[in-house]
Amino acid sequence: MSHSTISLCELHSGERGAIVRLEQGSGCVGRLAALGFTPGASVAVMRNPSHGPLIVAILDTEIALGRGQARHVQVRRLD
Amino acid sequence: MNGKAITIALAGQPNVGKSTVFNILTGLSQHVGNWPGKTVEQRVGSFEHDGLLVHMVDLPGTYCLTAASPEELIAREYIIRERPDVVVVVISAASLERNLYLVAELLALPFPLVIGLNMIDVARQGGFDVEPQVLAEAIGVPVIPMTATRNEGVHELVDAALQVVRHGPDGEPNRPEIRRDHQEVLMALQTIIAGQVPAPYPQEWVALKLLEGDEQATEMMREALGAERWAAVQAILERHEDAIIAVAGGRYEWIRRMTRAALKRPRAGQITLTQRLDRVATHPFGGLVMLAAVLALIFGLTYSLGGPLQRVIAVQVIGRLSGLARQLLAQGPGWLSGLVVNGIIGGAGTMLTFVPILLLFFTAMGLLEDTGYMARGAYVMDRFMHALGLHGKSFMPLFLGFGCNVPAIMGTRIIESRRGRLLTILLAPLVPCTGRLAVLAVLAPAFFPARATLISWCLTGLPLVILALTGSVASRFILRGESSAFIMEMPLYHVPNGRTIGLLVWNRILAFLEKAGTIILLVSVIIWLLSFLPHGDIQSSYLAIAGKLLAPLGSLMGLDWRPMVALLTSFVAKENSVATLGVLYGVGQDTGALLQALSVAMTPASGLAFLVTQMLFIPCAATVAVIKQETGSWKWALLDMAFLAGLAIVGGIIAYRVASLVL
């Protein structure tokens, strides 16, 4: 497995990533996993403003995600 | 099932149209209350179908069935303990895979299931094509296609549910299995807990939940197993702390298998209407502008249309009724006429005059919620709410406070974190409600004839500024704690549904009348009694005595005992201040004469002090009651009251001192 993972926060608007792992500590791993944030799933970033939550698309749904939560989602950049 | 009635539990993730289905089937028979011992809304209703009485329980919408939130616990406890005859789970064809996660969770429980595949129309528009029959065969559970907003398929859904209840499910469904690499661990857990699981919890389900790290299951088994066995369980769990991800992953693998043949996606790169609208709606700058415009529109419409309606009610309904009562009771003792006309009809009248404003306001808010725009508002406001120690989801309930603090505080249920919810509830009374704004609008011209509008705007902004300051201080020093996760679905925009909004508004107004209304009436009668006893003259009544006791405090703000009494009566309903002043200055209902009298009796400085105090003072009794109800104890309600009372007095004194120098 490639070790060049970045956090979801580091993807820019319009970029896509494949989820590699969810880090504990954000307290919401269960909820994220239930929404489709599982290893291998692909996620697209719709909005990544400088402040405030991101909007990502996963499994045909758009989800607003706080930066703190997004930081704990490790992804591999796709193009 | 007894011969004549069955119970259906309705489950589903948020935004799948579950409420639409519930509303169609139960209509006005629905009763909205709370789940016992919780502040989560419970909706139940009943209807007749095919000669059978059907009771339907609308379970809280949840994404999954973990122990992470009260809603999820309520949903799963209900199914496990109350054993409904069948569970109907609503999913949306436009978000099939994610919705099936809840189905996967439900299939882990040994109860009959029927799936309602809703939003077929929306899915088709978005280019999604789902074959219900194929899905049904794959999962082994009936799948009924529906477009609930057009009332299509709902009847057939109930047919299918009844079929399952009457004749039993058609074979075993295809249940999700845990990922291969964790199968042994699961079996090991099952072996250890076998026979020790308290009824009525299914053993296999509990083992799975233990592996997921479920708090409730963990607590339950820690108590049920002996120390030895629990140590064995713990040893296993510690080696597999991330198992929840494996479990979730396994469910999604199952979902992919089930939907492979049944689901056709749209071509990649199609841009939906939702995405187009969101280019503005979620834009850091454009989104704010749009939100400000929408809210300004709501405000403007509500007050410009509602104002005249209020006047009509005040004159035609209340005025006539009071006149009639006065006539009828003219023969009887004076106190009876006073009690009925001023105490009872007055109280009821105050309540009723709120209704046109609330109707318009709630309808507008209902439209925002139903179309899906609310989520965008919360998203756009999130970073500003952070300064207050809150999340974007707190914004809308607080905004509801402009209509009435009561539904605003009840609306805080959408906030997931307990701390965020508590803070929002405590800050909500600082949002100037219709009552306070009415007092401001009526009285400002008495003290500031030339600049009434400017003063009104400033005094409307004042409590909001204080709200922001209080929030940021409180969250930093007092109510510290988890700044919890912000995870919010942004649903597709959709055409608002008249029935949904109608029922939403209906339930909110009913809540206002039931909770606020009865308290307003009660406190109105009490205050009237205090103003009448012991001699039948308000100038010498208990109320006046109370006002005079407070006069020293009032003099710090340039106020004599009469405005102090008006502050006391505003505890019934904020608008009462005006009526009370009218009585105490001897001008009755004549507003013009009241403004005259006030401008003579009080200097602009003391007038300003009064208005400031009015805007910051403790909320009406109904709001206090709801704070107690939603926070679960009197401690927070009383604390809030003390804080606001102190704030009002300090604010009034400062306003008076500063204004005396300047004006």
Image (spheres, coloured by chain):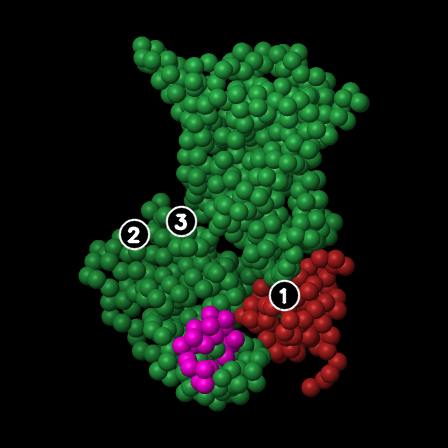
Q: Is residue B582 left or right of residue B29?
A: right
Q: Is residue B249 left or right of residue B136?
A: right
Q: Nearer the viewer, residue B291 or B569?
A: B569
What residue sits 34% from the left and 13% below the top?
B333
Question: Mark 3 is on which residue type?
Answer: Gly
- Picture quadrant where residue B2 is located: bottom left
Q: Can residue B305 be seen from the camera position used here?
A: no
Give the prevailing secondary structure in the magenta stretch.
helix
Q: Is residue A49 above or below residue B564?
A: below
Q: Which residues are magenta?
A: B211-230
For label 3, the residue is B33
- In the figure, the shade used to draw chain B is green
Secondary element type, mark 2: strand
Q: Position of residue B319 (x, y in %)?
A: 43, 18
| Spatial separation of the CA atoms under disc 2 and disc 3 | 18 Å
Please tell me if label 2 and label 3 are on a single chain: yes
Q: Is residue B315 left or right of residue B292?
A: left
